[in-house]
């Protein structure tokens, strides 16, 4: 009995030691948790100060605060996203990309991180990567206007217009009174050859925003594609009053030529060349008008032929890859 009693007492002593160990370990764990909470609180305080500094325009100081936050808690997604936002505003897209990428690694379902990453990738012209980032952002928030609009634009830049179309439509669906979104959708319709739809979007945009040269030029091009040349002339007249460019005059010359207003077309092409003597479409238009004048004179206006061939030769110097123009020079030169 004594041996049993001693054995039991010994086991109780061991149990007590073990329990003391558990208590000690638990106390250590609680201390670590408290320390982690304190660190997280400090990190979030740094982030809050950075946001205040950002509102005040003190971006470099805000960066310092965010770096301190990341030192305290390297897994704080908000700090990385805010840092990416500031770098992007400053134009430091490489640094912004790194910050957003880290945020997406920490929190893949964070919309701001994925969208910001897509935006700077697009700004860095890494368009395929940008598309993937925007798609991840839209898997989180499918109705986000900016993500749909920018994804459509990225696809358009990649010349993948059919893929762009549903996202451009979605952006307009989300915000039907946004003029730039209408312009974007119109450009995509034009890229896939749906010119009537493009015209409707451009005209809707014109009711929602001030006329801009790109809007008027795009509208004029689509009007020309549908054979509405007089409307094209009228639209280009508005554009030229705002911004007299070589491209606008060249498009005007094209429309006037289609309307068989040959002298006016020649004048428009000549104005384009005056503004930019390396604008080869305008040189081509001028050359064709002059050769047309030569032919209409029963081939007696040799000066028109000479000037026309000279204009076409200048065009070929600028862009040699024009077989049709080379053929005209060969035939009339």
Image (cartoon, helix red, strand yellow):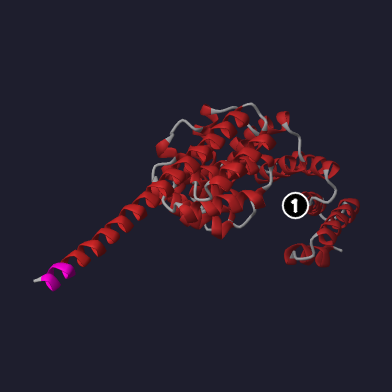
Q: Residue at x 72, y 28 (%)?
A: 241
Q: Which residue is the site of mark 1?
A: 281
Which image quadrant is residue 243 in? Answer: top right
Q: Residue furthest left?
A: 1
Q: Is residue 117 left or right of residue 144?
A: right
Front one among 203 and 48: 48
Tag 1 secondary structure: helix
**Dominant secondary structure (helix, strand or loop) of the stretch shown in magenta:** helix
User: How far across and how far down the image is residue 95, in percent?
Assistant: 65, 50
User: How far across and how far down the image is residue 190, in percent?
Assistant: 53, 49
User: How far across and how far down the image is residue 195, in percent?
Assistant: 51, 47
Q: Is residue 308 magenta?
A: no
Q: Residue at x 65, y 49 (%)?
A: 93
Q: Residue at x 77, y 62 (%)?
A: 325
Q: Give the residues in magenta.
A: 2-7
Front one among 242 and 237: 242
Residue 187 visible in image? no
Q: Is residue 4 magenta?
A: yes
Residue 304 visible in image? yes
30, above or below 234, in the image = below
User: How far across and how far down the image is residue 26, in percent?
Assistant: 34, 52
What is the count of numbered marks?
1
329, above or below 142, in the image = below
Q: Residue at x 24, y 62 (%)?
A: 13
In the picture, the quarter occupied by the N terminus is bottom left
In the picture, the quarter occupied by the C terminus is bottom right
């Amino acid at each position: 009995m004594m041996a049993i009693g001693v054995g039991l007492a010994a086991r109780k002593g061991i149990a007590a030691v073990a329990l003391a160990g558990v208590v000690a370990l638990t106390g250590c764990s609680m201390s670590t948790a408290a320390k982690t909470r304190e660190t997280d609180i400090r990190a979030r305080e740094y982030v809050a100060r950075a946001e205040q500094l950002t509102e005040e325009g003190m971006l470099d100081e805000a960066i310092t605060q965010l770096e301190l936050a990341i030192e305290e808690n390297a897994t704080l997604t908000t700090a990385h996203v805010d840092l990416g936002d500031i770098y992007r505003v400053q134009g430091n897209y490489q640094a912004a990309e790194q910050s957003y990428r880290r945020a997406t690694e920490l929190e893949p379902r964070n919309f701001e991180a994925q969208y910001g990453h897509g935006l700077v990738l697009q700004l860095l012209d890494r368009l395929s990567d940008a598309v993937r980032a925007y798609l991840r952002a839209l898997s989180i928030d499918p109705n986000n206007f900016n993500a749909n609009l920018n994804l459509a634009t990225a696809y358009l830049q990649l010349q993948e217009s059919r893929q762009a179309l549903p996202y451009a439509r979605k952006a307009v669906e989300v915000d039907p009174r946004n003029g730039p979104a209408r312009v974007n959708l119109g450009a995509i319709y034009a890229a896939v050859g749906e010119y009537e739809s493009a015209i409707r979007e451009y005209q809707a945009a014109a009711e929602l925003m001030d006329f801009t040269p790109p809007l008027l030029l795009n509208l004029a091009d689509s009007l020309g594609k549908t054979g509405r040349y007089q409307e094209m002339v009228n639209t280009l007249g508005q554009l030229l009053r705002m911004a007299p460019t070589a491209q606008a005059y060249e498009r005007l010359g094209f429309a006037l030529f289609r309307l068989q207003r040959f002298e006016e077309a020649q004048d428009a092409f000549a104005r384009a060349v005056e503004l930019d003597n390396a604008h080869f479409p305008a040189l081509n238009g001028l050359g064709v008008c002059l050769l047309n004048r030569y032919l209409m004179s029963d081939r007696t206006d040799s000066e028109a032929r000479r000037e026309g061939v000279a204009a076409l030769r200048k065009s070929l110097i600028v862009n040699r890859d024009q077989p049709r123009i080379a053929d005209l020079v060969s035939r009339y030169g």
